[in-house]
Image (tube, grey):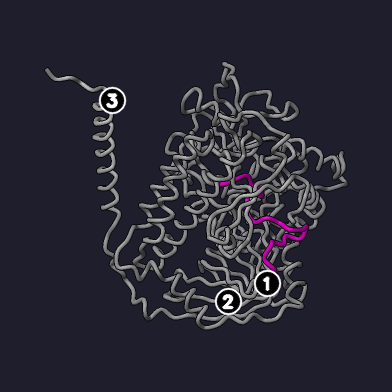
Amino acid sequence: MTVRNEATDQTRREFIALSGATAGMAAVGMAAWAQNNVEIDVDSISNTDHTTDVLVIGGGMAGLFAAVKAHDAGASTMIVSKGRLGSSGLTPFGKGFFVFDPATESGTIDDFVDAVSRSALGTNNATYTRQLAEHSLARAAELTEWGYFDQTLANRPFMKPIEERNIPLLERVVVTHLIKEDGKIAGAAGFRLDAEETVTIRAKSVVLCTGAGAFKPNGFPVCDLTHDGTIMAYEIGAKVTGKEWNDGHSTRSVNPAACYDNWGDMFERTPSTNGVEVHHDLGVDINYRAYVTGNPVAGGPGAAQPTEEIAGGPYVPEEFQHNDGPPSGGPAGDDGPPSGEGGAPGGPPPGFAAGANVGGASAGMAIHKSEGLVPYDDRCATNIAGLYAAGDALGSHMAGGIYTQIGSSLAGSAVQGAIAGEAAAEFSETAETPVITDDRLTEITDAILAPLRREAGYGPAWVTQTLQGIMIPNFVLYIKKASMMQAALAYVEELRDHHGPMLRAANMHELRLAHETRNMILSAEMKMRSSLMRTESRGSHYRLDYPEMDDVNWRAWINIFQGADGSMQLEKQPFDTWPS
């Protein structure tokens, strides 16, 4: 007679199942691993050198004003952009520009700052909130002079002040490395997308205007935003903040990957201004409803509003609760155009189309201005001497960990870009021209071109898809709990340690993808570690296992920095303080 051992049999069954799953993953991994059939002669790739006082990295709204104001302050200035000036990143998408005009607003700037602070549940940096209101009118006036509000595309109005000042502009250059020498910023390096050429730029000061970042999700125009500036700065010692917050944009469940079908009308609209309209939006309340009831969820004007009450979920202050169901707006449909960043005043931000929606459209991106480099003062300085950041590259917490003011993203980028540009120019007045040794430049160039020289390796597209599968699920990135985040973190660490160092590239386009993929992996690690550390729910960060807001222990931002051993370290910075 055979005696059955339940424990042994169960273990054996689990092992067989696990082995089968592992074999399946191995097969997929083997398909992703391949010889690198390089299409260019890597040894013939040339290099160009540039020198400037102020280097602005990024060609969006923040980069425009950083370059203009640095130049006007007397510094030689250069702009480098991964795309075209005004036509890459999220600048073409944002159409609403917040303006605080004392002549028309019924309240004061103090009233505005207080309202944002209430909505943000204390997570905003009131200094940067106030700056937004104080300087927005002047920035809008300059944009009006350049013709920004008269046309749908930003390239021509952006080029007007650049050409008038004869500011050098390098477009379609992927910057991969910031260079630090003797504790100070010394420049940057990268490569051209349209030529077999690397680029090095010596600079006395650098302003990062590289935007936000995501995991290249379907359905939203953020696929060229991959946390490049954040990771470059982190790797030379800059501190990063706000990685636990989430942007809650959704998109239509019909053809969700058809970005233009869902959001194209946003690009076709001319920008406009709006006044004070404080909200508490783009958190994860709709993600929680989807988690409890299942996908898809309905939203937007004309959509059937939910009738059943859902217990629990993210906290929304009563002052800012919607009385007519989930926020409207989003991709335009039969019920009208989107509202919010690109819509008419009076509506919530885009992201909730009429009818059935699916989430994750902006997965990996935090609330505008809530993630990025830690500001050390009110002039956009970081902890690296000579390195500044502005717009979505600066974790200013201008609006806090939730979407508060309609149109504040574009306006905040303009305001901060101008402040950072002037500060960088002032720093460069007394800074010496940096000396970067040939050996150091060779080391950096070798790192830039490493994926092209790899004889075999993983394709960046496959690694990116794997990362998306790990990070984008609603129950990992948005509706959080420790067990799932720890599991996701283990996968991310494997990608970081094993797949990232083995990324291959056959041409300059794939070289870009390889560097972007590595940046997204490190950003995913930051998001999981900071989300695990914040053991409460607040704003756009929600945890099932810690559903309440904890003002005793968590009136603090989380900052991330690289330890002496290369490991990722985290620390608290109390609200309403500057880092020490």
Q: Residue at x 72, y 69 (%)?
A: 424
Which amino acid type corresponds to the residue marked 1 in the rendered image?
Ser
Which secondary structure type mostly characterizes the magenta part of the structure? loop
Q: Residue at x 52, y 35 (%)?
A: 482
Q: Dot 3: what SS?
A: helix
Is residue 375 located in the magenta-colored stretch of the structure?
yes
- In this view, the residue in front, 539 or 86, is 539
Q: Mark 1 and mark 2 in contact (Cβ < 8 Å)?
A: no
Quadrant in which the C terminus appears: bottom right
Q: Which residues are magenta?
A: 365-385
What label does residue 7 carry, if any?
3
Residue 382: image quadrant is: bottom right
Q: CA distance from mark 3 to mark 2?
A: 64 Å
What label does residue 205 carry, if any?
1
Residue position marked by numbered label 2 in the rendering: 201
Answer yes or no: is residue 294 visible.
yes
- In this view, the residue in front, 159 or 395, is 395
Left of 378 or right of it: where is 535?
A: left
Q: CA distance from mark 3 to mark 1?
A: 64 Å
Mark 1 neighbour class, 10 Å CA radius: few under 14, some 14 to 19, many 20 or more: many
Q: Position of residue 106 (x, y in %)?
A: 87, 39
Which amino acid type corresponds to the residue marked 2 in the rendered image?
Ile
Q: Mark 1 and mark 3 in contact (Cβ < 8 Å)?
A: no
